[in-house]
Amino acid sequence: MVPELKSKIAIIGGGPAGCSCAYFLKQKGFSPAIFEKNSPLKTLLPTGGGRCNLAHFEFDIKELVQNYPRGEKFLYSVFSQFATAETIEFFENIGVKTYTQEDMRVFPVSDSAADVRRCMLNSISGIKINNENVISIKTCNGGFEVKTDKGAYFFEKIVLAIGGHSVFNIIKMLGHTIIPPHPALTALETKESFSNLSGVSIKSVKATFNKKILTGDILFTHKGISGPLVYKISSIMAKEKFPYEIIFDFVGDINFQNVLNNNSQKVVKNILSDFIPKSLAKHILLKAQINENLKGHQINGEIRDKIYRYLKNYPIEVMAPVKDGEVVTCGGVALDEVNPKTMESKIIKNLFFCGEILDIDGFCGGFNLQNCWSTAFVAAKGIEKSI
Ligand SMILES: Cc1cc2nc3c(=O)[nH]c(=O)nc-3n(C[C@H](O)[C@H](O)[C@H](O)COP(=O)(O)OP(=O)(O)OC[C@H]3O[C@@H](n4cnc5c(N)ncnc54)[C@H](O)[C@@H]3O)c2cc1C
């Protein structure tokens, strides 16, 4: 007997998590009110470089959860209710056909985040979206008083979906613990300047940091380093102290002496350019104080070892995340205070959470939006169950 509760549910935050939760509630016959201080789903527009990487083509939950440096255990229970297959079906149902790239990232066929936004907004047509900034939420008379910049309202149930970039006072007022937010998935500022290499990318670089080894692609920027491998490292290291060191191996397994023997008449900057971009070759030779025009046969053992050290073990001191450049934040509502089977607060009855507001964050590849869709579905189901 659902209708009794119509409009008695407020969703605070009209981002991907809040709007998908509204859709799942609507499917169950509810008519929640959304409170959004900006335009609804505006935060979806820049995702995937404007193409919206909405999921990752991974159907094994054990594998899927490994892409979340924070939230892995919690999400196991969430994903057992709603994961990749259900996400693709959800989007099909609202008119978004998807395809999977070679790297397993799932995109809309239109390659347009704006198109996904349009379909999502259509799917929740009829649901009231209040363009209001929520300032406080207090428990009262078995429900909640929601104060905004425009008025005060009473609701019986609340879904908090204000994202990870918000001021968390509202949640603290309700008595929940907030794990301090840190930028995750960022480019990194380095002590050494690579501005002369800005825009140069290198594939399959091996990185050693904090006793971990990862391989992937990097990009030099005017402030330091970026690219998929760097984003992953920034995510794993999000809560660590700066500065920290990353050692890059640019060349993998090569027999450098053989390379020199086979190129005895070639100048060293050109020899290195067979393995790494020429600009990086010149940078390394300058750093090692070696004449870039030495020929292969002029390179003795000492010079060879000096060059090889930089090719195999290039140390980079990371000073900070690039300011305001994060894709997601780690931190947020402490997971031990939320029931992963319903997304309901363990502290306050009838209070639910979904999306990035939680202390959950994933790597690049569709994992962060997957967290939004899945926790939104479980919250909607939790609300239905709570009646
Ligand atoms: C550039 C960029 C690219 C990205 N690309 C991808 C990608 O391709 N794939 C992927 O999986 N993830 C991607 N992400 C991450 C993904 O966008 C986020 O994880 C996701 O948007 C989180 O959704 P959310 O609804 O939880 O929070 P948000 O998107 O932050 O939405 C929260 C909403 O709540 C509103 N709000 C906040 N406080 C209040 C308040 N007090 N009152 C009223 N309204 C309020 C905000 O205005 C906002 O609209 C990307 C992020 C960025 C920045």
Image: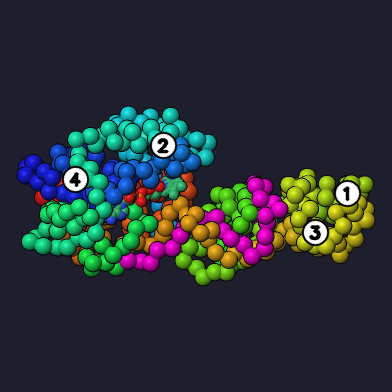
**Tag 2 and tag 1, C-beta contact below 8 Å:** no
Q: Is mark 2 within 8 Å of ligand 1?
A: yes
Label number found at residue 286: 3
Instruction: Please name which of the two marks, 2 or 1, marks the residue nearer to the observer.
Output: 2
Amino acid type shown at disc 3: Leu
Give residue 230's position: percent from left, percent from top.
57, 55
**Tag 1 and tag 3, C-beta contact below 8 Å:** no
Q: Mark 2 points at which residue?
A: 113
Q: Earlier in the sequence, mark 2 or mark 1?
A: 2
Amino acid type shown at disc 2: Ala
* Secondary structure of the residue carrying numbered label 2: helix
The residue sitting at the front extreme is: 150
Q: Name the residue under label 1.
A: 267
Question: Which class describes the residues within 10 Å of circle 2: few (<14), some (14-19), or many (20+)?
Answer: many
Q: Distance between the residues labelled 3 and 4?
A: 62 Å
Give residue 112's position: percent from left, percent from top.
43, 33
Which of the image's four quarters has the N terminus? top left
Give residue 206's position: percent from left, percent from top.
64, 55
